[in-house]
Image (cartoon, grey):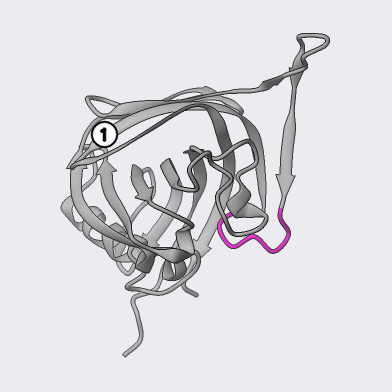
Amino acid sequence: MTATRWAMQGQGYEYCNCDFGCGCNFGGFPNSKDGSCRALVGFKIDSGSCGDVDLSGVTCAAIIDWPKAIHEGGGKCAFVVDPSTTDAQAGVLGQIFTGQLGGMPWELLGPTFEVVGLEKARITIEGSGPKSTFRIDGIGEGRGDTFTNPVTGKEHLAEVHLPTGFIWTRGQCGVGTFSVSAAGVSVASENSNWILYDFDWSNA
């Protein structure tokens, strides 16, 4: 049986407890203080669809707590969607993000965590570029900023280019602080990794 075709393009807002750059992107293992991977990842879908369900304009987030490296599994995940998201949209997003429909990166990421809840809460995005805040009413937020040159005090801009990256290939990096809690999954970190990227995912 052929899986339902899906595709989506937009922006990803990734705040995690790794040191800057995130060791997972380079060696496959977190460079956080305790070796865990705890993250708030927001998604602003500019255009997309799954079968006959239009996903354009949907904003959602995943709150994930992996005890060790992502590929070692054992993670817990709470999904959050904006109240404007329809049940049909939430349903197909759940299938995509858990890897049921195939397609990168979710066919690899989905099996590494257990979904423990889905909540609806108003999501707003403030600022732009590395200075972006991803806020979820009643759940928490992630705040991003640029690096600062310790000598001059000026902004120090940085990007990571991963030509063969399977989640993203080019990300704007900075300093992130986040604290979120939903469906029993609570994650937080201060002055740690934050990456803003464009995504273009599908199971085509």
Q: Is residue 129 above or below residue 59?
A: above
Instruction: Please give the name of the residue rendered at 65% of the width and 43% of the height, measured from the top-left corner.
Output: 171
Q: Do we see residue 161 in this rendering?
A: yes
Q: Is residue 123 left or right of residue 152?
A: left
Question: Residue 86, image x and y in percent?
Answer: 20, 49
Question: Residue 149, image x and y in percent?
Answer: 77, 17
Q: Is residue 121 left or right of residue 108?
A: left
Nearer-the-camera pick, 177 or 170: 177
- Mark 1 surroundings within 10 Å by alpha-carbon count, few (fewer than 14), some (14 through 19), many (20 or more): some
Using the rendered view, name the quadrant where residue 165 is placed: bottom right
Q: Is residue 132 above or below residue 80?
A: above
Task: Say which amino acid is labelled 1.
Answer: Ser
Determine whether the residue tagged by mark 1 lies in a helix, strand or loop. Answer: strand
Instruction: Please give the name of the residue rendered at 41% of the width and 74% of the height, measured from the top-left corner.
Output: 102
Residue furthest toward the bottom? 1
Instruction: Please give the name of the residue rendered at 22% of the width and 59% of the height, measured from the top-left corner.
Output: 91
Q: Is residue 120 magenta?
A: no
Using the rendered view, name the quadrant where residue 48 is placed: bottom left
Question: Residue 22, image x and y in percent?
Answer: 60, 44
Q: Main secondary structure of the magenta part?
A: loop
Q: Which residues are magenta?
A: 162-168
Q: Is residue 164 magenta?
A: yes
Q: Do we see residue 124 in this rendering?
A: no
Residue furthest toward the right? 151
Q: Which residue position is annotated with label 1?
A: 181
